Amino acid sequence: MSDESNTALMHSLIKSLEENDAEKALSLCTEDVTFVTPYGRFKGKEEVGNYFKWMFNAMQGIKFTKAGVEFLVQGDKGVDEHIVTGVHDGVPVEFLAICTYQFSNGKIKEMRDAFDRLTMADQAVKGWLPKKMIGTIVQKTRDGLG
């Protein structure tokens, strides 16, 4: 497939995830698709579909805003960098995600997501002690761990 076709696949996947349409997202994938996320490794359409449904329940109003590398495709590989926003447990969240793709015969064969988990933790943590601990780590990271 052409780079343009694979770029269109990535666009379609993002759109279907924003629309909470697991069936549409899965239609873009091979039968033996693999999705590796910070939450686990999911193999095959059934497991990946269950992950998508969990994601839709865990975060409402999910949106992907382009940041940095926007749909860079070369041959059967692609990468996408975006900011994910939504609402988790009634709290607005925002974090960076980098996703890589491998394509096969006009479908997505493998996806890998990497999230900015420190930013996620900083937004999700509750209670004064955990907030203080995460806040200190975040500040030290911003200061260059100096």
Image (spheres, rainbow, N blue to C red):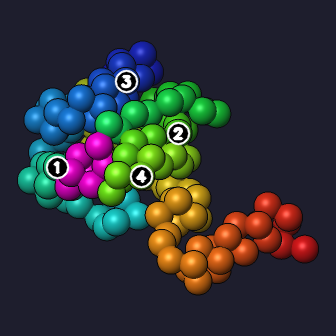
Range of magenta residues:
54-60
Q: CA distance from mark 4 to mark 1?
A: 19 Å
Q: Residue 83: which numbered mark, if any?
A: 2
Which residue is disc 3 drawn over?
11
Q: Is residue 81 above or below residue 71?
A: below
From this viewpoint, is residue 33 visible? no
In the rendered structure, which amino acid carries the disc numbered 1? Lys
- Where disc 4 sits, the SS reads strand
Mark 3 or 2: the one toward you: 2
Most foreground residue, 104 or 94:
94
Q: Residue furthest front?
A: 128
Which residue is disc 4 drawn over?
91
Is 19 placed left or right of 89 in the picture?
A: left
The answer to whether marks 3 and 4 mark residues whose Cβ atoms lie closer than 8 Å is no
Dot 1, how many residues are within 10 Å of its Cα: few (below 14), some (14-19), or many (20+)? some
Q: CA distance from mark 4 to mark 2?
A: 16 Å
